[in-house]
Amino acid sequence: MLWLVCGLAGLPAGGLAQSAPRAESPQRAQEAPRVSGQQPGRPPGVQVYAYTFRHKRAAEALVLIRPLLSKEGTIELQPESNTLVVRDTLAALGRIVPTLHAYDRPPQPLRIRVMIVRASTRVVSGIPEAKPLPPWLEQRLRGLLRWDHYTVLAESGLDTEEGQDVSDEVGGLYGVSFRLGSVFEDERIQLRDFRIWHADRKIEKPLLRATLNLWLGKPKVLGLANSESSDQALMVVLNCERPEPARNQVSPVISPPERP
């Protein structure tokens, strides 16, 4: 089996380096670090700062803080109290403390949209309740991939928030589950342990398991085919965005990404 992974036009290059989310408020983000005094056995100038998270998991902040440590710095996770203990210079703590405060904010509401699409080099007939892709999306896929015909098999929309475990049925024949990460400053979010499966006669057939990076409002396309020359493939179109203000409910639609 060959997995194909691609993003639509406008998706940032696939750098995975984490960046800190926007600060909850500039005043809070600029607080001076409250540190303890010099600890015995520590290099000169190294201070200790402990931060207990109120809204996020301390373990998920490790990837943010490690790149900010100096060569003298260390970080300790205390999961029982949801606390990080950072030992580093005052200069490094001046970078780290605002990042911790900015990250530890109440979770944002998000909307996840999932679309299951059949791609083929010819028209496939006899698919019940199938419908065409939005024209802009089909045009983009034709420009990226070798298949000429795209048909929506199932779709689903789910309102959730950062840090939630998500499990949903898509069209009665497919299922997805993942854990949402947090939205970073570059509008990127991780779908951790993303799984999708096909339920055939109540038997789950796994199709994909991975950790994915999405950018808000920029659909991501995943594809599965038997070979590079296969006539057909199964496509999964994912989109994550902030929900719009409440209005009359409509069926979920993958919207075109905004132009820069």
Image (cartoon, rainbow, N blue to C red):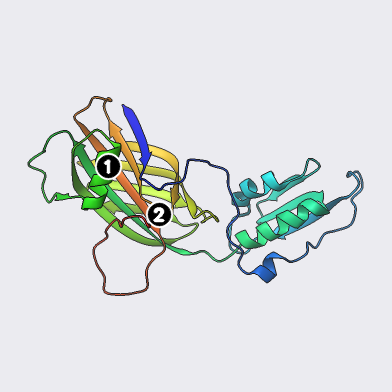
In which quadrant will I find the N terminus? top left
Is residue 115 visible in this depiction of the protein? yes
Q: Is residue 31 above or below residue 148?
A: below
Q: Is residue 134 above or below residue 127?
A: below
Q: Which mark is residue 252?
A: none
Q: Which residue is mark 2?
A: 166
Quadrant of res 200: top left
Q: Which residue is mark 1?
A: 141
Is residue 203 visible in this depiction of the protein? no
Decide which of 104, 185 is in the foreground and name it.
Answer: 185
Q: What residue type is disc 2 on?
A: Val
Q: What residue type is disc 1 on?
A: Leu
Mark 2 or mark 1, which is nearer to you?
A: 1
- Image position, residue 248 (x, y; %): 26, 74
Seen at 66% across and 57% down, the residue is 99
Seen at 55% across and 56% down, the residue is 185
Quadrant of res 117: top left
Seen at 18% across and 29% down, the residue is 231
Seen at 92% across and 47% down, the residue is 40
- Image position, residue 127 (x, y; %): 11, 44
| Gap between marks 2 and 1 measured at Cα | 27 Å
**Do tag 2 and tag 1 residues touch (Cβ < 8 Å)?**
no
Left or right of residue 44: residue 237: left
